[in-house]
Image: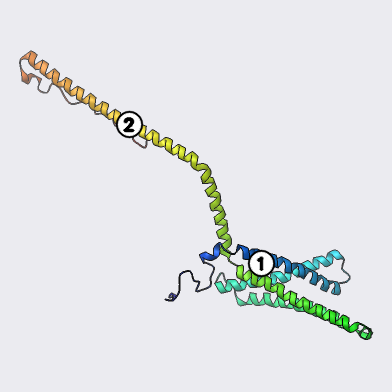
Amino acid sequence: MSVKKLDERPGERPDDGYAVSADLAGLPIAELVHLLALAAVAAADLAMFYNVVSIVMQQLTATLAWLTVVGFTAASLMLAHFAGRMIRDRKAGHGDVGRLPIAVLLIAWLSLGALALLVRLTAAAPTGANSYLPGAADEQSTQIVGAFMFLVLYVASGAVAGFGEYFTRNPYRGRYRKALRGHNRASKRLSRSQPAYQRSFNTLRVHEEQRDREDVNYRAAIDLRKATAQWLKKKANLMIAAHLQDPSATDGLTRPDAAPAPQSPSPTATI
């Protein structure tokens, strides 16, 4: 069981994990910048890889060459992308990410770049009598500069893909945004149904108040009937006793009501 340090402040992430509330709704601008930068370096990679493919596979048609270029570009960017994702997940303790998959991705990315750079440098090397032609040295220098420009661009595109994913990665953010969209939809439905519900609720309250008033009137009528019955019983006893000249003759002549007063309707019976 881990013991929390006394000098930790609220809101800090001692394990550098994803479960930080401040990170869930943030980074929309950073994600947009990352996507724009990734699109820019992907376009540049397409051009550079097309140059490499045109040197090695001159027999390919334009369509096949561009398909190969797109495949190389996607492979290089996705290798760096998933390497950055796995490194971030491993640091955050999210999932079971080992070092071997990360190493495989990085080695594959480096191998792809090294192969492309080797092709560019090989194409830049003069062969046979061409090395003695005028301008051969200048052309070779230009090819070498182009090869190292490709290297710089390849590293830069990998850094954009890898570090961009590393710094913007949070799997809980997508779930939070999905839940937020669901909450907003539910709030809109509630705002549409709330007036009708309020009208129905007010109508129910009016009916309940009317039911309570009728119940009071009903019980008042029952009490009045009982009082009238008692008065009639007493009057009958007095008249019979006076007629017979015997007060004891009316003992037990009248009895209490045989039928009790009916109960009022239950409040839940009308709902």
Residue 183 in the image: x percent, y percent?
53, 52
* Circle nearer the viewer, 2 or 1: 1
- Describe the colour scheme in one phrase: rainbow
- Above or below, comparing residue 222 to residue 128 in the picture: above
Q: Residue at x 71, y 70 (%)?
A: 77
Name the amino acid type tagged 1.
His
Viewed as shown, does residue 230 lie left or right of 201?
left
> On the rendered structure, is 74 left or right of 133?
left
Task: Judge the density around disc 1: few (<14), some (14-19), many (≥20) Cα neighbours within 10 Å.
Answer: some
Kindly identify which numbered label has been placed on residue 34. Answer: 1
The quarter of the image holding the N terminus is bottom left
Q: Residue furthest toward the top?
A: 243
Residue at (54, 68) in percent of width and height: 18
Q: Which mark is residue 213?
A: 2
Q: Which element carries disc 2, helix, strand or loop?
A: helix
Q: Nearer the viewer, residue 231 or 10?
A: 10
Within-10-Å neighbours for mark 2: few <14, some 14–19, many 20+: few
